[in-house]
Amino acid sequence: MTTSCSSNQNSTCACKSNPEKTPTTTTTETNNGSDDDDVWAMDDDEGNHNGTEDSRKLAYNDIIRQHRKQGYVDGITAHREDQLQRGFDDAFPQGAQLGIEVGKILARLRCQQGREDKRGEGSDNFKRAINDLSISKVLDRQYFNDDLEPLPTHDLIEKWKHHQPQSPS
């Protein structure tokens, strides 16, 4: 009886890599019916063939079990990848919008810093904004509801959107 491997990794399938359970050649064809060299044969004192049949059933059951397990693992992996992609597709536009807002704020503050530097004024607004608007702070749990949806207003971004430059002291 031949079985085919349904694993995507045919060459690495456990049922094919175990030489004790999968014969590479059938010796019964080459030795004119003698069971002396049969890889499936069992060493039993009585010499009956029930042991051979039982060992073949066990080997077949092992192969079936390995294929079912591999199918289960493949199914779980595919489901996880699908869910990960779906989550990415749903959240990417929201994350991109936050990134655009942060980029606009930092660009505005950087331009202000350049103008202040030309006038000989100095403020640390840009450096403070870079620190405040780091990704770990912008994506902090406090800015999302229990379903991990963004709150209607992002207080940190709103603070910096409306931030007025401090005059140097």
Image (cartoon, rainbow, N blue to C red):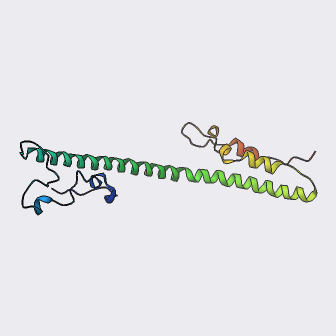
Rendered location of residue 169, percent (x, y):
93, 45
Q: Is residue 32 visible?
A: yes
At 18% from the left edge and 57% from the top edge, which residue is drawn? Answer: 2
Along the viewing direction, whichever of 46 and 76 lies nearer the viewer: 46
Q: Is residue 42 above or below residue 142?
A: below
Rendered location of residue 37, percent (x, y):
14, 55
Instruction: Give the position of the N terminus as an image quadrant.
Output: bottom left
Along the viewing direction, whichever of 164 and 41 lies nearer the viewer: 41
Rendered location of residue 55, percent (x, y):
16, 46
Along the viewing direction, whichever of 133 and 75 lies nearer the viewer: 75
Count of labels in the image: 0
Q: Is residue 161 visible?
A: no
Residue found farthest to the bottom: 30
Tell whether 10 sits left or right of 57.
Answer: right
Rendered location of residue 65, percent (x, y):
25, 46
Tell whether 28 sits left or right of 150.
Answer: left
At 63% from the left edge and 53% from the top edge, which residue is drawn? Answer: 97
At 29% from the left edge and 54% from the top edge, which residue is drawn? Answer: 17
Tell whether 151 sits left or right of 11.
Answer: right
